[in-house]
């Protein structure tokens, strides 16, 4: 793995280039990891992956715990690993224990033996040796070490214990790590700045290729988050990439970029798609096409539209006229509305294609702002514009 920071803005926000695995082209950061179920996006079939912007869409986040059901890890290993099994030879697979959708940390059942997760198979206790057996079988391009993640409301003693366990499991995972695959050391610490710094200092002293920052999206407020993020990133080596889970909303992504985070998960896309929503917010953070928003469209606002609403039943226009994604180039709101209302799976396929394409465009706009030195201006314009549009929408529906 090779990573280089190419531009800085306002002290912490940065853009870089990541060269990993078999991906034919370097991937610019900040970038988005596409959430997957057993290595493939939840709704987009493999045949449609090439329709997404390349190489931005070549980062896939994999949860090793998904492979505790179905094909055994030994079988996957005999096939040649996950790349070979899925036929995704040009894609980068990043393995993280938590996927923020189906495998969530369960701190009350975690103990000194291993980490507990709520999974589709029920509540499971995963030991470091078992976790590393999964990693060895899947052969991802990069993987995060096992962590004891806790929400913000746990006691100070429990929080300190989670850091101690995470550091101990880090050493165990490194000792058991297979040849190949970049190791991202896990950093936790809950809502304590001191524990976050302590964990970051310990991980920074280990032989790791990058950092996975965990424990976010578990109860902390938007106001608390910047100080916690800065406490971690200020401690880490600048030349290594930083990956985070739990920050999905555009405002949260901008918070992460402002703190110096390079890679983000994409659970926001999954939840939007499942709800029948399509992203329409302007990628430059400024003006929005008001014709794309209908006040009678329940649940919508000028940042997204609810395509289940009857207002779109006879709408012959695409989701966004200027969008170049497969969905907008070939289908209308009326057709997607019909698919949603008759419960056709194609609706989620088309929506996930559009939402992923649109969110990747959002990350391109972020990178451009960082490179030009205008990130803070871009961030403020985006947040204020989005807040104003939400307020107008709320007033109109009151």
Image (cartoon, rainbow, N blue to C red):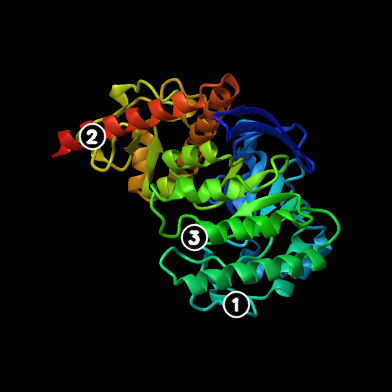
Residue 144, how many percent across, how many down? 68, 57
Q: Is residue 322 left or right of residue 11?
A: left
Vertical order, 36 against 291 (above or below): below
Residue 70, how many percent across, how many down? 65, 69
Q: Residue at x 58, y 42 (%)?
A: 261
The Cα–Cα distance between marks 1 and 3, rounded to whole angstroms, is: 25 Å
Query: Residue at label 3?
Result: 192
Query: Residue at label 2?
Result: 391
Q: Of marks 2 and 3, which one's residue comes earlier in the chain? A: 3
The Cα–Cα distance between marks 2 and 1, rounded to whole angstroms, is: 44 Å
Secondary structure state at the residue bearing disc 1: strand
Work out which residue is located at the far left of the displayed protein and give it.
398
Give whichever of 66, 386 is nearer the camera.
386
Give the position of the N terminus as an image quadrant.
top right
Query: Residue at label 1?
Result: 125
Pointers 2 and 1 in contact (CB under 8 A)? no
Residue 335, how many percent across, how many down? 38, 35
Residue 89, how many percent across, how many down? 77, 44
The Cα–Cα distance between marks 2 and 3, rounded to whole angstroms, is: 33 Å
Asked whether residue 210 appears in the rendered view, the answer is yes
Secondary structure state at the residue bearing disc 3: loop
Vertical order, 122 against 234 (above or below): below
Marks 1 and 3: which is nearer the front? 3
Secondary structure state at the residue bearing disc 2: helix
Q: Residue at x 34, y 39 (%)?
A: 337
Q: Residue at x 71, y 52 (%)?
A: 86
Q: Of marks 1 and 3, which one's residue comes earlier in the chain? A: 1
Q: Of marks 2 and 1, which one's residue comes earlier in the chain? A: 1
For label 1, count other residues whose C-alpha is less than 10 Å away and answer few (under 14), some (14-19) or many (20+).
Answer: some
Marks 2 and 3: which is nearer the front? 3
């Amino acid at each position: 793995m090779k990573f280089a920071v190419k531009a800085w803005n306002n002290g912490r926000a940065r853009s870089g280039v990541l060269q990993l695995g078999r991906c034919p082209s370097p991937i610019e950061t900040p970038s988005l990891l596409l959430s997957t179920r057993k290595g493939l996006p939840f709704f987009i079939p493999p045949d449609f992956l090439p329709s997404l912007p390349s190489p931005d869409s070549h980062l896939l986040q994999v949860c090793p715990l998904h492979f505790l059901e179905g094909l055994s890890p030994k079988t996957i290993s005999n096939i040649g690993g996950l790349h070979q099994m899925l036929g995704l030879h040009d894609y980068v697979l990043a393995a993280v224990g938590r996927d923020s959708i189906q495998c969530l940390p369960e701190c009350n059942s975690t103990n000194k033996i291993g980490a507990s997760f709520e999974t589709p198979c029920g509540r499971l206790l995963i030991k470091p040796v078992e976790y590393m057996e999964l990693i060895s079988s899947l052969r991802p391009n990069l993987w995060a070490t096992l962590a004891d993640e806790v929400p913000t409301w746990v006691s100070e003693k429990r929080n300190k214990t989670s850091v101690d366990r995470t550091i101990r499991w880090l050493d165990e995972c490194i000792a058991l790590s297979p040849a190949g695959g970049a190791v991202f050391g896990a950093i936790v610490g809950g809502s304590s700045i001191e524990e976050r710094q302590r964990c970051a200092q310990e991980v920074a002293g280990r032989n790791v290729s990058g950092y996975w920052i965990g424990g976010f999206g578990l109860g902390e407020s938007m106001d608390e988050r910047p100080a916690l993020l800065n406490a971690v990133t200020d401690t880490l080596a600048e030349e290594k990439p930083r990956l985070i889970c739990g920050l999905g909303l555009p405002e949260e992504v901008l918070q992460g970029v402002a703190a110096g985070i390079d890679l983000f998960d994409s659970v926001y896309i999954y939840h939007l798609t499942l709800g029948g929503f399509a992203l329409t917010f302007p990628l430059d953070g400024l003006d929005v096409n008001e014709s794309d928003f209908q006040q009678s469209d329940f649940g919508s606002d000028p940042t997204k539209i609810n395509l289940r609403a009857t207002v779109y039943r006879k709408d012959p226009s695409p989701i966004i006229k200027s969008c170049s994604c497969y969905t907008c180039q070939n289908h209308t709101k009326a057709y997607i509305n019909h698919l949603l209302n008759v419960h056709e799976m194609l609706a989620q396929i088309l929506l996930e294609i559009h939402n992923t394409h649109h969110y990747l465009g959002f990350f391109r706009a972020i990178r451009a702002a960082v490179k030009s030195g205008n990130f803070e201006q871009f961030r403020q314009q985006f947040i204020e514009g989005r807040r104003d549009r939400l307020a107008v929408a709320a007033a109109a529906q009151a």
